[in-house]
Structures are given as structure tokens and as C-alpha cells.
Image (cartoon, grey):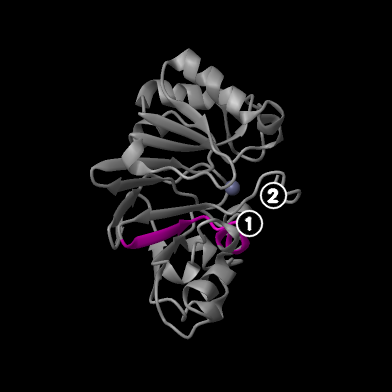
């Protein structure tokens, strides 16, 4: 999906009060920001967060650090990233790390704060590289983001946000799949347990795209009796209206 750009891979911009956080700036993140209407101005960012180092989640992290810090002229902002995104075979260039005010290493079951956004990690995901899902507390709202992972029994209990964003790559489960991702079957299991007010499916692979994500979401919604939507490029969700 990413190399063909059948869907854009820019990630998510979270804005709460005066605080702006960019989550998973994949390839195209900067261009998507500047082309969006109204324009999203990266120099307004307070932080960038990587759930993991895979390229579809981090491809634009360096250029976005440049943009957030105005080419390094304004030392500002925080980068949140797992250790392996910084250490071995890093995805964040070393010379850029001085541009930000702080690099905070994401760890299991830890709490973080940037301005008006509080968030915590749960246990490590099963996804080859160090990967974390995030629970955001943006009072009075809670948002859970289940980033790439293979399904494991504790997964639903870790993410209980009233809004649930799930990375669902596959329509059907693949047995012994080497690249660990969730399928719609896994989503059903999770949503049945968590019963979020709104579930947003995103991060689709080819089988999901072929099945038309909005159709899959509508079927899920009917089956589960809970609101489920499929993300689309440039989609904006107003927390006050959920
Ligand atoms: Zn991944």
C-alpha cells in the first residue's frame, strides 16, 4: 500500500487545545500536512511519536523533525520513540536529535505527558520490532490506538478507550504469517470485549482495500451493534462530536 500509495501513509495529527502531537509520520507525512486544507503547520508541533520503527510509520520522521524545529533553528519539541528506533539500525538521524528539546524513550507500561495530552503505553506488542499501542487520556475523552501487532489474548484488555483506532491489515487471518498483523476476525474479538463508543479501522493492506474498507466497517457495525468506521485519507474526527 505504501510503495504504491494506493492509500496515503502520513499518520495521524492529534490536536488538543494548544498541544499538537504527530503520530507515526510515514512516507508523505510532510507533504500531506502542507497540502491539507486548512494547512497543518509542522512548526506548530509539540511532539512526534513513533509506535515503532517500521518505515510505513517512520519514513518522514526526520523531515518532520526538521519542519517542527524550523530546520534546527528553533530547538523545540519532544520525540517519543521505542529504544530500537534510536539505537541499532536507527530510523532517527543522530544529527537531528539535538534539534528537539528532548528524546523520550517509550517503554512498557509507562506514562507520558506532552502539554494537554497524557498517554500511556501497555505491554510490548508482538511485532518483530519494539512496538507500542497507546492509551490517550484527553479529559473527558479516552482514545486507544492499537498499533501493529499479532493478536494475543491480553490485547483487548489493554486498550479500553471510548474511541478505538485499530491497525487492521488483513481481511482474513493468515496462519503462521511472518509479518504480524491483525485481521478483521481479531478486530471482532477486540471490539466485542471492549465495546468502544467508536471504532476506527485504519492501516489497510491489499485484502482490506479490495474488500472496500467502508463496506467491511458497515458489516462489522451491523454485526456488532457498535459504531465502526473505516479511515480515509485526510479524514478529520472532532472529539467533541463523537
Ligand atoms: Zn509495522
Pointer 2 and pointer 1: residues touching (CB < 8 Å)?
yes
Establish whether ligand 1 lies closer than 8 Å to the Cβ of label 2.
Answer: no
* Residue at x 55%, y 81% (from the top left corner): 95
Seen as rendered, the residue at the extreme left is: 140
Q: Is residue 175 left or right of residue 231?
A: right
Left or right: 101, with 84 as reference point: left
Q: Which residue is mark 1?
A: 55
Q: Is residue 229 above or below residue 236?
A: above
Q: Residue at x 68, y 33 (%)?
A: 209
Tell me if the residue at label 1 has its CB under 8 Å from ligand 1.
Answer: no
Name the residue nearer the viewer: 193 or 198.
198
In the image, which disc is placed on residue 2?
A: 2
Up-down: is 64 above or below 182?
below
Given the current orientation, which residue lies at the most extreme bottom position? 73
Residue displayed at 62% across by 62% down: 31
Place of residue 11 in the rendered image (x, y in percent of width and height, measured from the top left):
54, 52
Extreme right residue here? Answer: 4
Rendering coords of residue 119 (x, y %): 32, 52
Mark 2: secondary structure: loop
Locate residue 123: give its quadrant: top left
The spot of residue 22 in percent (x, y) is 46, 58
- Which region is colored magenta? 18-33
Amino acid at each position: 500500500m505504501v510503495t504504491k500509495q494506493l492509500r496515503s501513509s502520513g499518520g495521524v495529527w492529534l490536536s488538543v487545545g494548544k498541544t499538537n502531537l504527530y503520530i507515526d509520520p510515514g512516507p508523505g507525512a510532510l507533504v500531506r500536512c502542507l497540502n491539507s486544507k486548512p494547512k497543518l503547520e509542522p512548526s506548530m508541533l509539540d511532539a512526534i511519536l513513533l509506535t515503532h520503527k517500521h518505515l510505513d510509520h517512520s519514513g518522514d520522521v526526520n523531515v518532520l523533525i526538521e519542519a517542527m524545529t524550523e530546520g534546527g533553528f528553533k530547538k523545540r519539541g519532544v520525540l517519543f520513540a521505542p529504544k530500537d528506533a534510536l539505537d541499532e539500525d536507527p530510523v532517527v538521524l543522530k544529527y537531528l536529535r539535538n534539534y528537539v528539546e528532548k528524546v523520550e524513550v517509550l517503554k512498557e507500561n509507562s506514562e507520558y505527558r506532552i502539554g494537554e495530552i497524557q498517554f500511556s503505553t501497555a505491554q510490548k506488542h508482538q511485532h518483530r520490532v519494539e512496538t507500542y499501542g497507546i492509551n490517550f487520556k484527553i479529559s473527558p475523552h479516552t482514545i486507544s490506538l492499537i498499533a501493529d501487532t499479532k493478536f494475543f489474548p491480553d490485547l483487548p484488555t489493554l486498550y479500553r478507550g471510548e474511541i478505538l483506532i485499530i491497525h487492521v491489515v488483513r481481511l482474513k487471518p493468515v496462519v503462521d504469517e511472518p509479518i504480524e498483523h491483525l485481521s478483521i476476525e481479531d478486530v471482532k474479538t477486540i471490539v466485542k470485549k471492549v465495546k468502544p463508543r467508536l471504532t476506527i479501522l485504519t492501516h489497510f493492506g491489499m485484502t482490506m482495500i479490495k474488500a472496500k474498507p467502508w463496506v467491511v466497517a458497515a458489516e462489522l457495525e451491523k454485526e456488532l451493534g457498535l459504531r465502526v468506521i473505516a479511515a480515509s485519507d485526510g479524514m478529520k474526527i472532532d472529539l467533541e462530536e463523537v
